[in-house]
Image (cartoon, grey):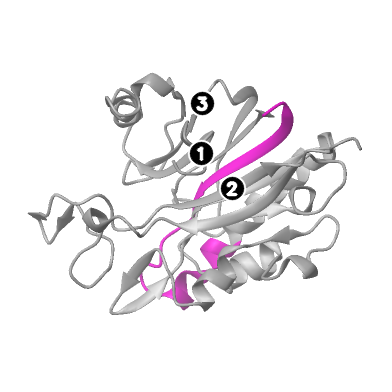
Amino acid sequence: TDITPKGPAIIGVSEIENRTVLEDIVKDPQLKELNYQIIHHDSPDRRGVDVGFLYNPRMFRVLNVTHHTLSIPDMPNFRTRDQTCVTGLLAGEKISIIVNHWPSRLGGEASSRHLRVAAANLCKHIADSCLAVDPNQGVVIMGDLNDDPSNDSCAKAIGAVKKIKDVKEGGWFNPFWEVLDNGVGTLAYRGQWNLFDQIMLSSYLIGDDRSTLKYFKCKVHNDVPEMRNESGAPLRTFSGGVFLNGFSDHFPTQVFLAREVKVKQ
């Protein structure tokens, strides 16, 4: 709230059981006055978890919502979370946000890699479709991707790069790649940090003169003591069936976009 005193304009969430969970969140006394609105869709995921989208109507106006199912040709019974694409006006400027929760690493990273690459290919197709309809907009890919920025799904299928100077027109920037390189992650597994909770931005939001909204900075929200356990990792709600009164097994991430103001001399 030091930078955004009215809260985030947009919040993407993963692993939501149902719409009621989101309704409980936006009705919380700490958030109620912000009047967050909900976009939710029941996915075919076998565990019954979905992605969701919250937005402040004073800062974001919805124009269109689509939901996209991931199909794996040689796995007819495969079921995972749908990807939700919300197009709207953020501070008056058109933007499309794709909220994801890519397939897990169950069975190992290598053996499940093709599933996340397939999810990334679907996400890239959605993004390309948005830009084909209107190239004069920013596109954001966000969510729990179950991969790090350097993995094939993000670095190759999406094509997101580490440094702003390397972003080509029509390309993608992943600000959290350098964050992980600096030893900061969003979840810890067997003492090693990963950064699965990513937000990637299209080149339009980096240095394109057509956009007045520009990438400013990113952050992993890990500085609230109540959100960490003794080792500094996220404090889970449950572990081994034991209630820990925690928040989540992942830290949230945030990207800030700043409006470029042109002053007349």
Report which quarter residue 258 is drawn in. Answer: top right
Identify residue for label 3.
56
Residue at which label 1 appears: 4
Find residue 232 and report its horizontal and vertical position in percent.
26, 69
Real-space Cα distance between discs 3 and 2? 15 Å
Q: Which residue is mark 2?
A: 256
Q: Earlier in the sequence, mark 3 or mark 2?
A: 3
Label 3 packing within 10 angstroms: few (<14), some (14-19), many (20+): some
Is residue 159 highlighted in magenta? no
Would you say the residues marked 3 and 2 are in contact, meaning their CB atoms lie under 8 Å apart?
no
Above or below for 4 versus 201: above
Q: Residue at x 52, y 62 (%)?
A: 115
Whether the residues at callouts 2 and 1 have beta carbons within 8 Å, the answer is yes
User: What range of the chain is rendered magenta?
Assistant: 91-117
**Residue 143 at what x, y percent from top left?**
50, 51
Q: Quadrant of the C terminus?
A: top right
Q: Residue at x 50, y 77 (%)?
A: 182
Judge whether 130 appears above or below 171 on screen. above
